[in-house]
Every structure is written in structure tokens, then in C-alpha cells.
Amino acid sequence: MKVIERFEVPYYQYLNENSELADEIPPIAEDTEALLRLYSLMILVRTMDAKAIALQRTGKLGTYPSTRGQEAVFVGIGNAMAKDDIFIPYYRDMGTLIQRGVKLSQILQYWGGDERGNCFADSKDFPFSVPVGSQPLHASGAAYAVKYHKEHRAVLTVCGDGATSQGDFYEAMNVAGVWKLPVVFVVCNNQWAISVSREAQTAASTLAQKAIAAGFVGEQVDGNDIIAVQHRTVEALKQARDKHEPRLLEMICYRQHDHTTADDATRYEPKHLRGQEWKKEPIIRLRNFLEKMGVWNATKEEELQTACANEVDQSVKEYLNTPPQPLTAMFDYLYEKLPDIYQEQRNMLVDAEKNIHG
Ligand SMILES: Cc1ncc(C[n+]2csc(CCOP(=O)(O)OP(=O)(O)O)c2C)c(N)n1
Ligand SMILES: [Mg+2]
């Protein structure tokens, strides 16, 4: 009897947790300028993340999902995408969004409850989407449109490990496989779906193997190795654009914070895990590598930290100084022509605002 190992998927890592390079490396590993840019962006994202949590704690921001420990996934993806590609985010994607032209202050605006923060005007990118598992379906739909219009671009979407248990996820992958759609599905496997651990989520030994049933390639990528994240995403997007081959990338990382600011992970996360996983985190790994290459040192680090802190402070000022929307805004984005019943309610609000502001 011939036995075929059906569930094996490749695992990609180029820079290991001791900051050592593998024998075979992709072009980005030798591009010092590019690596320094990626490093700077990861520091900016981590700085902004800490600030966003502090803003929430002091009542200046709504519930916020931290991206701590997962920076390489989102910064790497953002770097790999072409301007013309279409990005369909979920809610931890700050590191990608800032490379798609979204301002930090706008991201804060969204998490502050102002929908104007969700209007990514100059691109075909989609807005933040919080319903778990909705993004892959949107991505297959957009990829169908791309193919239908014979455009040379790809669609990339991100969801979490928990989302891969949703029926929507399988349906989106199934249609992408059978219709050969130019789409890349990225799973940010941060090991938790709020309090549900990766082990409790699925009996599948990898999430990447879920692509096999849909008829296309699934890969595991070390999500703490930004070189691997960037390179595998570049390759997947190329396959999608040039050959209309979908791909699934499972980025393995660890959520180094509560699920959101509304969560308390000490209630379910084994105490030792965060520290154990921190040894693999992406920023120190790249920093040590850059130092070994002689292109980074403590002075440069200090300058970068100061520059990022200043940029973040500036964004916070912009966010806090943005005047709130008029009350009537809630009626302005749902309908092209407002139905009469809402028109009456809108008029009442206009009067109410006049009474408030004179
Ligand atoms: C359809 C739906 N069900 C439940 C929720 C509540 N919820 C928000 S995030 C989350 C867990 C998602 O985990 P995962 O997909 O691993 O993404 P992560 O937040 O870890 O990045 C849940 C259940 C939701 N937003 N949408
Ligand atoms: Mg998760």
C-alpha cells in the first residue's frame, strides 16, 4: 500500500530566534535599507500600540486590540503588497494600514468610535471589519471582481486563528480554489481567540493545511521572522497576480497582550507562556541581526525611539483635536437617498444641535 502524507505543509523561517540567517535566504535579507525600514516601522507600531492602550485606560479611546508581539506579521505584509493590490483588514492590522496610507491619527479615530477613521479614501482597500471570519468572504468577492475586470492585482486579507473555524473561512477558500481567484489569505495565528487556545480551537495539526481541501497551497511561516513574512507574502501575491493561484499563509506568532483592552488574560493564560514566547518576539530578533551586521547601535536606537515617540504624540494631538462629527452623521452613510422616516429624525437632530450650539 502506498501511503501519501496528505497534510504536510512547508514551514518557512530565514532568521531564527538567535538572529542567525538560514543558508538559503531571500533578497530582502541582504537589503540593509529595507530591513532598517521594516525595523523602524515595527518600533513605530509598538510605540503607538502602547500609547493606544494608555489612551484607553485614561478614557480617551474605546476598546482597542493590541498588536504587541505581532508586529512582524502586519509590517511584513504591508511591505510586500503593491500599491494596486487590495487590502482587506480585520482589526489588528495597524502595521499594514500605515503602509497603505492610513494615518495613525485616523486609526485612533476609528478606535475612538468615529467612523471617519474607517474611510480609507485614496485606495480600493476595505475598512476595518470586526465580525470574525467576514474578511475572507469579502476577499474572495473582491478577487472575483479583479479577475472579471482582467486587472493585474491581488487581494490580500488577514484573519485570526479563531476565524479559521468559521464556516465563512472554508467557503471563501473553497470558492477561491475552484474559481482560481487572485487572493492571498493570511492567518495571524497568535495562539488565542480571546480565551480559546490554539489547541482548543481545532484538532488540525496546522491551520495552513486547511488550504489543501480547497485545492491550493498552504504554508506555515514564522510570524516572528519579518524576513520570512515579507518574502512569503511577496511570493504568494505574485502567484495570485500572475497565475490566479490563491494561497494561505499561516503566520505563527504570539499575542503579547490581553485580547483587547476589555479583556484580562490572567484569567486563562498560563503564567509562563508569555515570557517563554517573548524569547521569539520579532523586534529584538531583527535588532540583534542589524547590530551583528554593524548597521545598528544604541545611539541609533535611542534616536529612533525618540522619533517614534514624537510621531505618536503628534498623532495623538491630531486625534484629540479633531472636532466630533455632527450628530446627524449617523444618518449620512447608509443610504444614497434617506428614507422619509429617517429624514424626519434627522431634521429633529438638526434642531437639537442648533439648540445646543446656538
Ligand atoms: C462573528 C463574530 N463572533 C464573535 C465575535 C467576538 N470576537 C471578537 S474577536 C474574537 C476572537 C477572534 O480570535 P482570532 O480569530 O484568533 O483573532 P485574534 O483576535 O486573536 O487576532 C471573537 C470571538 C465577533 N467579533 N464576531
Ligand atoms: Mg488569535
Image (cartoon, grey):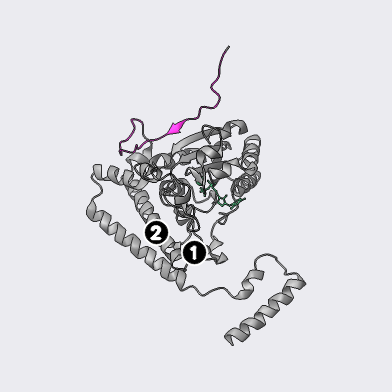
- As displayed, is residue 182 above or below residue 41? above
User: Which SS class for mark 2?
Assistant: helix
Q: Amino acid under label 2?
A: Ala
The verdict on residue 22 being magenta is: yes
Residue named by callout 2: 50
Q: Is residue 275 visible?
A: yes
Q: 229 or 59: nearer the eye?
A: 59
**Main SS of residues in magenta:** loop
Residue sitting at x 40%, y 48%: 69
Q: Which residue is mark 1?
A: 106
CA gap, disc 2 and disc 1: 16 Å
Magenta residues span 2-24
Of the 4 image quadrants, the one containing the N terminus is: top right
Residue 44 in magenta stretch: no
* Helix, strand or loop under label 1: helix
Kind of residue sitting beneath label 1: Gln
Depth check, front residue: 289 or 132: 132
**Cβ(mark 2) to ligand 1 < 8 Å?**
no
